[in-house]
Image (tube, coloured by chain):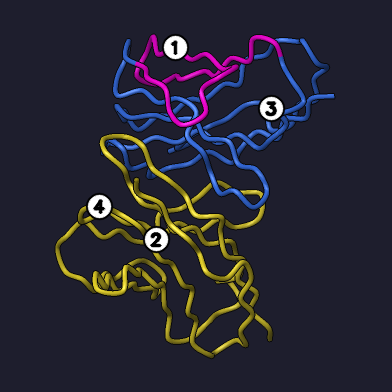
Amino acid sequence: NAGVTQTPKFQVLKTGQSMTLQCAQDMNHEYMSWYRQDPGMGLRLIHYSVGAGITDQGEVPNGYNVSRSTTEDFPLRLLSAAPSQTSVYFCASSYLRGQPQHFGDGTRLSIL
Amino acid sequence: AQSVTQLDSHVSVSEGTPVLLRCNYSSSYSPSLFWYVQHPNKGLQLLLKYTSAATLVKGINGFEAEFKKSETSFHLTKPSAHMSDAAEYFCVVRRDGNDMRFGAGTRLTVKP
């Protein structure tokens, strides 16, 4: 089992560029979520999905879009990158709604 | 609104001595509480959870936590620290539905 796979692991962008962070899971979990981790702030929920075709906003959704066309994939899109979006991004999945169990190893994103 | 406060940003213990990581929560009703661990450059791993059953919760790797409503606390303990326990630990409260709020984290250092 691969678990939750995030790509890329590292990325540097310029302000205004767009990008998609990929997340895939092979456990047939319905619940998937995206978090950002900033120093001294723990993790904050960006968007989540309770199944294919269903997404909703979390605590800090501005500047990010998501879609869930399949159970396996949950990509996160930055439409116009800003320096404030420099962070480490984690994708998570679970069979239990609202309780992430399996996390990817993260994507470290720098916006210049 | 539910939130958590981790009382120590950094805890240092010697190998073989007890571990205590402190967490206080605020909630208008009986919350769901979790502890996660994050090893360097990795995603988070669920250690244990409290969901209004037994107040003493046992988790993986010898960790346990006790829910004390009168003190609004959910401290994480382990009788004997191991070098492999060195990591960042997060206390988390689940709000309604799918929103989880993370504490700022406690970095545990284990000295030989």
Q: Do discs 3 and 1 belong to a common subunit?
A: yes
Amino acid type, callout 1: Ser
Tell me how far mark 2 sits from mark 4, CA to CA: 25 Å
Instruction: Tell me which chain the residue with mark 4 is part of.
Output: B
Q: Nearer the viewer, mark 2 or mark 4?
A: 4
Q: Which residue is mark 4?
A: B28
Discs 3, 2: same chain: no
Location of residue B90 with respect to B74 vertically, above or below: above
Residue marked by disc 2? B47
Task: Please tell me whether mark 4 or mark 1 is closer to you in this view.
Answer: 4
Amino acid beneath label 3 = Gln
Q: In 3D space, how far apart are the residues under numbered discs 3 and 1 (Cα atoms)?
A: 19 Å
Question: Looking at the picture, which amino acid does disc 4 mark?
Answer: Ser
Amino acid type, label 2: Leu
First of labels 3, 1 by sequence position: 1
Please state, as top left, top right, bottom left or bottom right, where the C terminus of chain A lies in the image. Answer: top right
- Vertical position of residue A67 compared to residue B94: above or below: above
Picture quarter containing residue A49? Answer: top left
Range shown magenta? A55-80
Asked if badge 2 and badge 1 are on a common chain, one would say no
Residue at 72% across / 28% down in the picture? A84
Could you tell me residue B53's position as x and y percent?
14, 63
Residue A85's tag is 3
Q: Is residue A62 magenta?
A: yes
Task: Confirm or deny contact between disc 2 and disc 4 (CB under 8 A).
Answer: no
Residues at discs 3 and 1 in contact (Cβ within 8 Å): no
